Image (tube, helix red, strand yellow):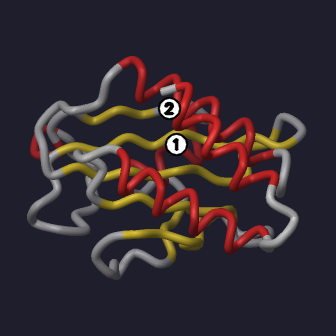
Amino acid sequence: MSELKKRLSSILESPKHNTEEKLQKVCHLLDQEISYFNWTGFYFKNGDKDELILGPYVGAPTDHTIIPYGKGICGQVAVSNETFIVPDVKLQDNYLSCSIDTKAEIVVPIFKNGVNIGQIDIDSHTLNPFTKEDLELLEWLCHEVSKIL
């Protein structure tokens, strides 16, 4: 994981790319390096509206480009301000299905100056794949991403 963190840091610190390009590269790296990350993307607060708007992502196209607060796992994290790990999406009442292949999801909020401004959302085609190391990596990543936003 420390090697992956170094690679992620070098992307985020790169002076050659704008923020959107950096986030796209982060998605690509996570997708390449972690086999059970099957959809990796960022959602951000949409201006002053109580909704999220899709940012850079890697994976199958999604209809969920705008998600109202409270709706689905991402919308719940926008309200709760807490990481949400779903080992089996079939057992989750408020799940928004992006793909019939998705079996698990993890959403980690991004805070800037104490305010929840967005999140990273990862879907997996594997049941209960997310580890403590994944959680630590994603929480670290969200903290690092907040520095460039």
* Amino acid type at image mark 2: Thr
Q: Secondary structure at mark 2?
A: loop
What x and y, as percent, mark residue 23? 63, 63
Residue at 28% in and 76% down: 60
Q: Which residue is mark 2?
A: 83
- Position of 126 with respect to 27 (left or right) is left
- Position of 40 with respect to 127 (left or right) is right
Residue at 11% in and 37% down: 127
What x and y, as percent, mark residue 46? 69, 71
The residue lying toward the viewer, choosing from 67 and 56, is 56
Residue at 79% in and 68% down: 48
What x and y, as percent, mark residue 117? 73, 52
Q: Which residue is mark 1?
A: 77
* Amino acid type at image mark 1: Val
Q: Nearer the viewer, mark 2 or mark 1?
A: 2
In three-dimensional space, the C-alpha distance between marks 2 and 1, rounded to whole angstroms, equals 7 Å
Q: Secondary structure at mark 1?
A: helix
Location of residue 54 (image quadrant):
bottom right
